[in-house]
Image (spheres, rainbow, N blue to C red):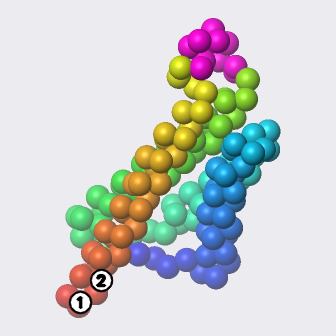
């Protein structure tokens, strides 16, 4: 994996902290939580996209694709957090409650699980690849 430089690493960490703060604030301060989460998600996702893998290991390439899917889910979480405040799709109230209201939490859990899985598996695969050299 191409390592991030110092500034990129700081942006990556700040993005992760902002996502965590936005998710926690989702219940306490729901009006500003989507903005905090969205800024964090954009910073986090941008830095993960910049981390490229130039090797040929099929397992790492597959894990990288899973990580990118998780990044897309993080952006979906931000949009669902915004949609949670009001009814931007002009749905009837029952449909909005059933399909939109607080469902961002489920998507966030899926994205977080995929992130955890790929980070730990990718680390193990990169260590195996380094030992082969």
Q: Residue 101 is drawn in which quadrant?
A: top right
In the figure, 38 relative to 67: above or below?
above
Q: Residue 7 is drawn in which quadrant?
A: bottom right
Q: Dots 2 and 1: beta carbons under 8 Å?
A: yes
- Numbered badge on residue 93: none
Number of marks in picture: 2
Q: Secondary structure at mark 2?
A: helix
Q: Secondary structure at mark 1?
A: helix
Please name the residue shown 52% across and 63% down the image: 48
Please name the residue shown 47% across and 54% down the image: 112
Q: Position of residue 92 (x, y in %)?
A: 63, 8
> On the picture, is 66 further left or further right than 5?
left
Q: Is residue 40 visible?
A: no
Q: Which residue is mark 2?
A: 127
In the figure, 85 relative to 46: above or below?
above
- Numbered badge on residue 131: 1
Which region is colored magenta?
87-97
Few, some or many C-alpha atoms within 10 Å of disc 2 (few <14, some 14-19, many ≥20)? few
Q: Residue 62 is drawn in which quadrant?
A: bottom left
Q: Quadrant of the N terminus?
A: bottom left
Few, some or many C-alpha atoms within 10 Å of disc 1 (few <14, some 14-19, many ≥20)? few
In the figure, 56 relative to 85: above or below?
below
Q: Residue furthest top?
A: 92
Q: Position of residue 115 (x, y in %)?
A: 43, 59
């Amino acid at each position: 994996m191409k390592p991030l430089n110092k500034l990129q690493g700081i942006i990556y960490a700040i993005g992760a902290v902002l996502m965590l703060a936005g998710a926690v604030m989702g219940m306490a301060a729901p009006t500003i939580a989507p903005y905090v989460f969205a800024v964090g998600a954009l910073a986090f996702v941008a830095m993960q996209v910049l981390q490229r893998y130039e090797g040929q290991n099929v397992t790492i390439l597959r894990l990288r694709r899973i990580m990118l899917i998780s990044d897309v889910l993080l952006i979906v979480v931000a949009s669902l957090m915004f949609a949670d405040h009001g009814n931007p799709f002009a749905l009837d109230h029952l449909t909005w409650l059933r399909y939109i209201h607080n469902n961002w939490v489920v998507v966030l859990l899926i994205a977080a699980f995929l992130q955890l899985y790929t980070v730990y598996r990718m680390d193990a695969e990169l260590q195996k690849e380094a030992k082969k050299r």
